Amino acid sequence: MVARGDLGIEIPAEKVFLAQKMLIAKCNRAGKPVICATQMLESMVHKPRPTRAEGSDVANAVLDGADCVMLSGETAKGDYPVEALKIMHYICKEAEAAAYHTKYFEELQRVTVKPTDTAHTIAIAATSAAVSCHASAIIVITTTGRTALDISHYRPTAPIVTVTRSDESARHCHLYYGVFPLHYRPWFACFRSAQWVSRYKPPMPIISISRNDCFSRQLHLYRGVFPLVYQSKDPSQPRDPDWPTDVDNRINYGITVGKERGFIHKGDFLIVITGWRQGAGYTNTLRVITAP
């Protein structure tokens, strides 16, 4: 949490912007979600529109690499809480479109310690492939959520649709940039996959599909991650006994939700990341497919 008000008490006012940029950069490099807060749209406590300086402040926080910008007094005691939220949304949307994702990706690659493990390697490859083929989404089939978080770290331009059986993983995925979690069905697991993907901040959304609803909620904190919790159609049979069929079912679920949300269309290129077997820690497969 980068609370500029508290920083202004501890350091001179003219150095607060440097502290903000330094702290956000360090969090981005470490793959930690970072929130920028305090007086983002302060004038909207009593006015229906923000000042232009406040709009620039919000946009620059996004361009600095913040995963989240937070409203406090504007919504807690302000006269225009809904309007403040909408304005914040519009500013962030424009700032995201203006961000130089490719340069960000290159810088993170440069500072990444080599050799990388399998999850990091897949995350880098997924982000690079999505940029090269202008993919509409990155679909991640995950038990733990780690792959989606890895990809999110590189800030792709496409959404990261993460399908998981764990509701906990799906919740956690909301913390990460670009991850869109889908809950496949309840299943306890961790969330490191989506987290590491988010760390590289690919320029497209990261759609993270998991069975763990808790981790899917947590992934909402990460920039660009859209966690989805997958629910099986037959409660008596939560998982298809045939592993390839089970994976295909979750991929189709992620594509369906992506179409409903409007960021996947027929004929779009999609990056799909899966594991070679059931369980956590087996993510090693990347495919480029066309949306049906």
Image (tube, helix red, strand yellow):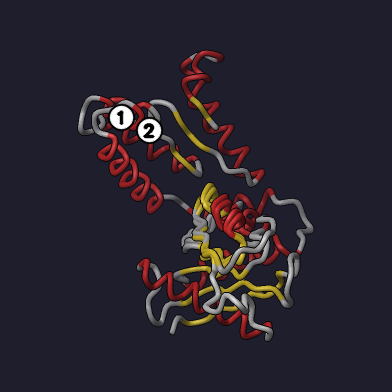
Q: Quadrant of residue 59 in the image?
A: top left
Q: Who's the residue at 43% across and 35% down the image?
A: 70
Where is residue 62 shown, x and y percent of the image?
Answer: 44, 42
Decide which of 246, 19 is in the foreground and name it: 246
Q: Are marks 1 and 2 in contact (CB under 8 Å)?
A: yes
How far apart marks 1 and 2 lie (CA) works out to 6 Å
**Extreme residue toward the front, this view:** 236
Secondary structure of residue under mark 2: helix
Secondary structure of residue under mark 1: helix
**Mark 1 — residue?**
53
**Extreme residue toward the right, this view:** 115
Left of 182 or right of it: where is 192?
A: right
Image quarter (top left, top right, bottom left or bottom right) of the N terminus? top right
Left of 277 or right of it: where is 173?
A: left
Decide which of 91, 111 is in the foreground and name it: 91
Total label count? 2
Q: Residues within 10 Å of mark 2 (few under 14, many from 20)?
A: some
Where is residue 251 shown, x and y percent of the image?
Answer: 54, 77
Where is residue 205 shown, x and y percent of the image?
Answer: 48, 61
Q: Who's the residue at 71% across and 72% down the image?
A: 284
**Mark 2 — residue?**
57
Depicted 249 relative to depicted 263: above or below: below
Where is residue 78 shown, x and y percent of the image?
Answer: 29, 27
What residue type is disc 2 on? Asp
